[in-house]
Image (cartoon, coloured by chain):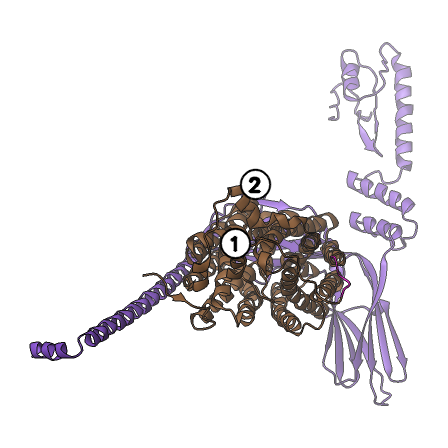
Chain colours: A brown, B purple
Amino acid sequence: MGPPVLAAAPDGGWGWLVALAVFLEAGLIFGVIRSFGVFFVEFLGHFGELAGRVSWVTSITIAILLFASPVGTSLSTQYGARPVVMAGGFLSGLGLLLASFATSLTHLYLSIGLLSGFGGALVFAPSVATLARYFKRRRALATAVAFSGPGLCSLAFSPLFQFLVDSYGWRGGLMIVAGMTFHLMACGALLRPLALTEDLALAPAPQRSWLAKLSSLFGLALLSSWPFLTFAVSGLLMNLGYLVPFAHLVPHAREMGFDEYQAACLMSMTGATDLCGRLVAGWLDARRAFRLLHTLTLWTLLTGITLLLVPFGHTYPTLMAIDLCYGFLAGAVVPLKFSCLVEIVGTGRILEATGLVHLLESFGALAGPPLSGFLRDVTGSYTVSFIASGTFLIVGGLVLFTVPNFCSCSTTSPPKQSGDPEDAGNLTRHNGDHPCDGKT
Amino acid sequence: EPAPVPRAGWAPTRPPALTVESGGRRRCVTPAQQPGTGGVSLQRYCSCPARTMRGSGSGAGSLRLLLSLAALWLSDANEPGTAMTTRDINQQTRKSISDYTVKEHDLSTPGSHLTTQDFNQQTEENISNLTSAVYSISINGFSSAPVEENVILYSPANIALSCNLTSPSTDSATVNVTWKKDNETLRSSSVTFNETKHVWSTQYMLKIRDRNQMGNYTCVFKRDQEVKATFHLQVPQIEGKEHHVVSYVGDSVVLVCKSIKYIPISWIWYMSNGSDQVAVNDSLMPDKYTVDEKYANITKLKILKISEEDDRSYWCQAVFKLGESKGKVSLKVLTYMTPLKPFLAIAAEVIILVAIIFLYEMYSKKKQMHAEDEKEFEQIEQLKSEDSNGVENSTTRHRKV
């Protein structure tokens, strides 16, 4: 007998366990990526390679995560969320386990970058979709709880990773982190499938060619929409700079002369203020005092300016203060971005829009940290890297000025697309402060 | 060349033919030619111009010999130091050279044997611009605890160490000040003592040229109590890594030592062997140890094919002009079993969690199914009892009974 068919989303009960599962998943995927700076320094020393080449590890992971998230979505609609998430969790852990035996950087690119990144993509998108199904009225609260995961987890993971490296070396440390990542499978087990009455009402989609499916999955038709296009380009530019601190703040701090645990603390503090930033963003979203697009532009510019200031933090307190500001601003930018996207394209096409934005942003994620690492190799310090990434963020914020109707004070409704299956949009509806573009 | 043995036929009054070394020159004496091969043999021994005196008259020849001998004796007597050995000569030639080039050095002290080291340093002193610095310590009162200061010296310099003692008492008793180096009292030739109001200050001038001048210099003020301050003159310290570097059997590891501010002349790596330190010879074992010195202030020792015996301490020694200093890096070698145990424990825990979750789900589903079955059963029963209303009820009841 299959799962009971419910009239409406339960908005509680098992849903809270699903929220807990997504919380842990977000923490295990993004918290690990954020705290990877500790391992970055070890790879630099062991493989004797340039910072540019080692940066590819983090950037490939995030890029594959973003790029392959539509694959996760489509697989989960076919087979259900639970098996896909458990398979993704297994792949993620396996990738890290294989990485602990790495003998070259290429080995790391393939095992951490490709395998763990793809596993993360399989985990994240279906989990978020399941969470959206379990909650309707309280969706905002549930997603806020769930996406505080990366912030809280990176708070603990950064010093923990340093401790693991001190006790077991980077190989042993990766092995134990792989064990931790296998908990993704346990989180996936919590995602009980839920059958809602509205699913049954959905008419089966007509058979389309795989190209049409792909294009609808990625929402390529959206590219013709000018507001979306500018928004996506802005997202691409922002991603070029946004991810650099997660990759290079710890090595930069070590080069400035701070010891291992001080540098690890910087990253964990970023996680703590990231949480505050998200909450403030959610509050701002609820208030609707200003137009979301204006708020997003302002925060993006501020984040870019903060990154520009990072090279000027010569003492530990100043660097920590700049770092806290960055964490706060960056944490707020992510949910704001998503809300703006909903505003621009409407909830009907949000799924495709998210997929397409992820796709474009994955290129930014792929290029950002290696470019920053290359600048460091050429100039000898991370100063130019941070200045460049701050500049990218500022340019991305400025591009947002070109979104049509920027200067109007009221939100314009997105153009209605005829023939859109509204139900499909309702099934995986993401609400206001729910960051779905993978940068949590 | 050995002095030719005088032949038996010669008159004993004549001096035998000798080769005399005097001032690096050799004098050859060609005696009168004897019939036979006498002259020829002499000529072979002495590298003299071939002056054959064959056939000359014996009388004229002997006179010439006498004259040349007399000239020989006379000239030899005038040259100083006939009995000098080669070593003395070398020293004197050196001294004469140094006299010319080092103009400012005071050679008034006779018999001073200039060694090569002094010579080099003096030329350096004249050529390079040396830094001058003053390091001072202030002492408050006679009852303060001994003060210490570390002075880092990287290259030869002229330094002045100064101690200032402020004492509030108006006691006008004299204060004696002495300077000591490593508990040996120094001559006060470079000490200046200044006494104004209640501040006694003393300054000791030092020319740091080599490692012998490094050490602990103490100024001691003595009246009725004694108070002292110490300057520790040392080369820049190298920081190793306080926490050990972890690596695995069969892996490779890179040990790094840095000296950011001061650039050493060279680096030497040592490894601990029991309680003493053995130099790491990377040229002897190139497939095991590689020293990378791309930059002068960073040295990297790469150890390949690590085994359990490489679990020891390593020292990187930086050689400076004024001494050496060492930094310690210790290596810890683990086998893959060490992190594998926690990993397997965590993996087992994950499997247990997943099993618990699925079992709970199956259990709660079973309960739900049971509850639904019971509901259905009750519903059917209710329908049945409603259907069989009236007469049939009693008959069924009768039948049951």
- Give residue B338's position: percent from left, percent from top: 43, 58
Amino acid type for the residue under numbered disc 1: Ala
Pick out the residue farthest to the front: B391
Q: Residue at x 50, y 69 (%)?
A: A135
Could you tell whether A141 is left or right of A85 in the image?
right
Could you tell whether B6 is left or right of A267 in the image?
right
Determine which quarter of the picture holds residue A302: bottom right
Pick out the residue farthest to the top: B55
Q: Is residue B274 visible?
A: no
Label 2 crowd (10 A; few <14 / some 14-19 / many >=20): few
Viewer-nearest residue: A76 or A67: A76
- Give residue B69's position: percent from left, percent from top: 88, 26
Viewer-nearest residue: B258 or A181: A181
- Give residue B4's position: percent from left, percent from top: 75, 23
Q: Is residue B197 above or below residue A283?
A: below
Question: What subunit carries mark 2?
Answer: B
Could you tell whether B186 is left or right of B355 in the image?
right
Determine which quarter of the picture holds residue B195: bottom right
Q: Is A405 part of what is drawn in magenta? A: yes
Question: What subunit carries mark 1?
Answer: A
Q: Which mark is residue A336?
A: none
Segment tinted magenta in the rendering = A404-408
Residue marked by disc 2:
B286
Please determine if labels 2 and 1 lie on a single subunit.
no
